[in-house]
Image: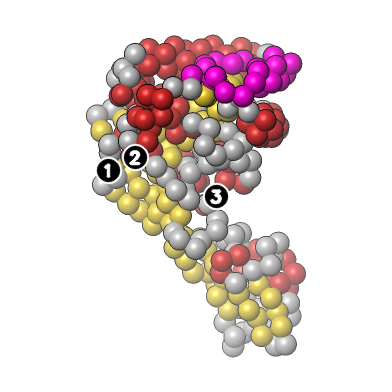
């Protein structure tokens, strides 16, 4: 089963949930934890695991052969990302904007465009017992996370339980991360900001037709409007994590919840069983 852990906003506890779930499952089954928050992956901190393998990730960017180019402007017209501009008998390429779609080279009437690889990040891997970590890391100054996320997800093994730690928000990297998941856990907090961004995240997973459930973190602050929203929308609340100083202290020290308070392991194992039940009901419905 592939379970993605997402939220509409940052700081709700996605990493806490993703690492706790992965560590709990790894006691009895092979597990892959995919850290797709590629701008700042931090799951490895809580796993006390060092990645020992690394592979670069490239995107194909256009290279202009000026001896063939007639500055017809076709490449500029077909580029949806404004990565090429034809100006006064000169074609300019802006590599940082290029998404590597290949339309310019394919449609160039003079065959004046070839593609070269430009490194935008790396995929790093490491293992500890039955737990494998695969994380993407975007190079500083680069903008495009989806190609790295796709490379991370290419390492998914069908024989393992897969937990995907998703970046915050509802933009392209989030869609790329949760696409193809069997279930999406939405982690939120009982605050007005938490509710607003949860609503946005629910819209995304529903567009993708992925069954979802909610985890409410830091219960004890805010109000009960998140619970009211979930009840109205028929979204199951699968777990509530209290506002607890001990949990916060463990997190600040880079200690996974289930390592610092072992009693939580059974809670997360029960959560995974409930995810399977809810997902099967959603699939049959």
Q: In the image, which disc is placed on residue 50?
A: 1
Q: Quadrant of the C terminus?
A: top right
Residue drawn at (41%, 29%) of the image: 248
Of tags 2 and 3, the one toward the viewer is 2
Q: Are marks 2 and 3 in contact (CB under 8 Å)?
A: no
Give the extent of the magenta segment.
219-242
Q: In the image, which disc is placed on residue 146?
A: 3
Q: Nearer the viewer, residue 193 or 237?
A: 193
Residue drawn at (43%, 40%) of the image: 35
User: Is residue 146 left or right of 130 when viewed as pictured?
Assistant: right
Q: Are marks 2 and 1 in contact (CB under 8 Å)?
A: yes
The image position of residue 20, as x and y in percent, is: 39, 25
Mark 2 / mark 3, whichever is N-terminal: 2
Real-space Cα distance between discs 2 and 3? 21 Å
Residue drawn at (38%, 16%) of the image: 264
Residue drawn at (54%, 19%) of the image: 220
- Provide the secondary structure element on which disc 3 rests: helix
- In the picture, residue 27 is in which quadrant? top left
Observer able to see residue 184: no
The image position of residue 181, as x and y in percent, is: 54, 30
Return the residue at label 2.
44
Real-space Cα distance between discs 2 and 1? 7 Å
């Amino acid at each position: 089963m592939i379970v993605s852990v997402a939220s509409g906003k940052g700081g709700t506890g996605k990493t806490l949930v993703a690492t706790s779930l992965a560590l709990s499952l790894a006691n009895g089954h092979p597990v892959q934890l995919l850290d797709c928050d590629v701008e700042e992956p931090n799951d490895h901190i809580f796993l006390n695991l060092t990645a020992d393998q690394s592979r670069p990730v490239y995107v194909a960017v256009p290279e202009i052969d000026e001896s063939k180019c007639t500055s017809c402007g076709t490449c500029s017209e077909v580029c949806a990302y404004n990565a090429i501009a034809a100006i006064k008998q000169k074609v300019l390429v802006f590599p940082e904007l290029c998404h590597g779609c290949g339309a310019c080279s394919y449609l160039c009437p003079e065959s004046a465009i070839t593609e070269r690889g430009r490194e935008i990040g790396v995929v790093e891997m490491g293992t500890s017992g039955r737990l494998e970590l695969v994380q993407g890391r975007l190079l500083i100054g680069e903008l495009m996370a989806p190609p790295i996320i796709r490379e991370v997800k290419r390492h998914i093994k069908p024989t393992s339980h897969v937990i995907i730690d998703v970046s915050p928000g509802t933009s392209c990297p989030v869609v790329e991360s949760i696409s193809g998941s069997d279930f999406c856990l939405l982690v939120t907090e009982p605050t007005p900001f938490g509710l607003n961004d949860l609503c946005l995240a629910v819209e995304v997973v529903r567009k993708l037709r992925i069954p979802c459930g909610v985890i409410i973190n830091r219960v004890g602050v805010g109000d009960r409007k998140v619970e009211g929203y979930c009840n109205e929308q028929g979204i199951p609340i699968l777990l509530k994590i209290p506002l607890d100083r001990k949990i916060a202290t463990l997190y600040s020290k880079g200690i996974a919840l289930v390592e610092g308070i072992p009693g939580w392991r059974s809670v997360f194992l029960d959560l995974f069983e409930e995810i399977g039940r809810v997902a099967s009901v959603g699939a049959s419905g």
